[in-house]
Image (spheres, rainbow, N blue to C red):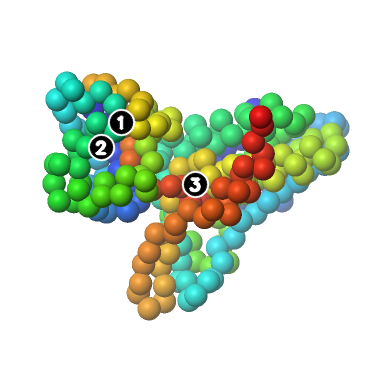
Amino acid sequence: MRILYFAWVRQKVGRAEEEVAPPPEVTTVAALVDWLAAQSPGHADAFANRRTIRCAVNQEFATPDQAVAAGDEIAFFPPVTGG
Amino acid sequence: MATVRVQHAAFDLGAEAALLAAGRTDVGGLASFVGLCRADDGLAALTLEHYPGMTERAIEAIAAEAEARWPLTGCTIIHRVGRLPPGEPIVLVLTASSHRAAALEACAFLIDWLKTRAPFWKREEFADGRERWVEAKAADDAAASRWDQT
């Protein structure tokens, strides 16, 4: 599973991307967030307020209950502010 | 099919508009929106970050939605990334149609949806050295929601 981070999520985690292999019970975005948040103090800080984080699975916006699997590209970022 | 570009370089509104009308006689109106970097509260520059790949796909999906809702003859969306000082253009939305209403409405729709659905993030840099990430605004969500279809 390839994880990408953008904007302040990237700054708090301390990296732009990483390869992870969470345990098999991690099957949804919400479960992945719980697992990632336990990986380092930076991850915990980035995911401290879940309501401020948005997610994309394979480059499509995703909800917390969406399924994730090995091989997916999953991105976490703040609400968008372009335009 | 819309023209979508995410780029560092500036864009030329006149040249892009001319391209939408070139070689055809069915275009009755062109509408444009250009978003500029505004110098609020001592802002020195904005830095725009995006998600290469997803950003282009998201803009193409937004453009396809506009083309499904209005009879456009063409559509161009260019969004800049990187560091942009006040006064610099950030985003260009251009729509062409046989009649003005479709061009004007589609242009407004596109910038409203771009602001809330395309993955870009702005970081503000101030003259005194402070930096902060721009937070999403409820007013932008409200502007985008007026295009919701039930």
The residue positioned 56% from the left and 67% from the top of the image is B38
Residue linked to disc 1: A29
Depth check: give the residue in front, A32 or B12. A32
Residue B82 is drawn in which quadrant? bottom left
Q: Which residue occupies 85% across, 37% down?
A: B99
Query: Which quadrant of the figure has residue B88?
Result: bottom right
Q: How many residues crowd mark 2 within 10 Å: few (<14), some (14–19), many (20+)?
A: some
> Residue B68 at x, y = what percent?
69, 26
Residue B107 horizontal side relative to residue B118, left or right: right
Label 3 crowd bin: few (<14), some (14–19), many (20+), radius 10 Å: few
Is B68 or B2 nearer to us in this picture?
B68
Dot 2: chain letter: A
Q: Nearer the viewer, mark 3 or mark 1?
A: 1
Q: Which residue type does callout 3 highlight?
A: Gln
What is the chain letter for disc 3? B
According to the picture, the residue beneath numbered tag 3 turns out to be B7
Residue at the image position 75 percent from the left and 42 percent from the top: B105
Q: How many marks?
A: 3
The location of residue B77, given as percent across then percent down, is 61, 42
Q: Position of residue A19 (x, y in %)?
A: 19, 33
Q: CA distance from mark 3 to mark 1?
A: 31 Å
- Compared across the picture, whether B96 is left or right of B93 comes to right
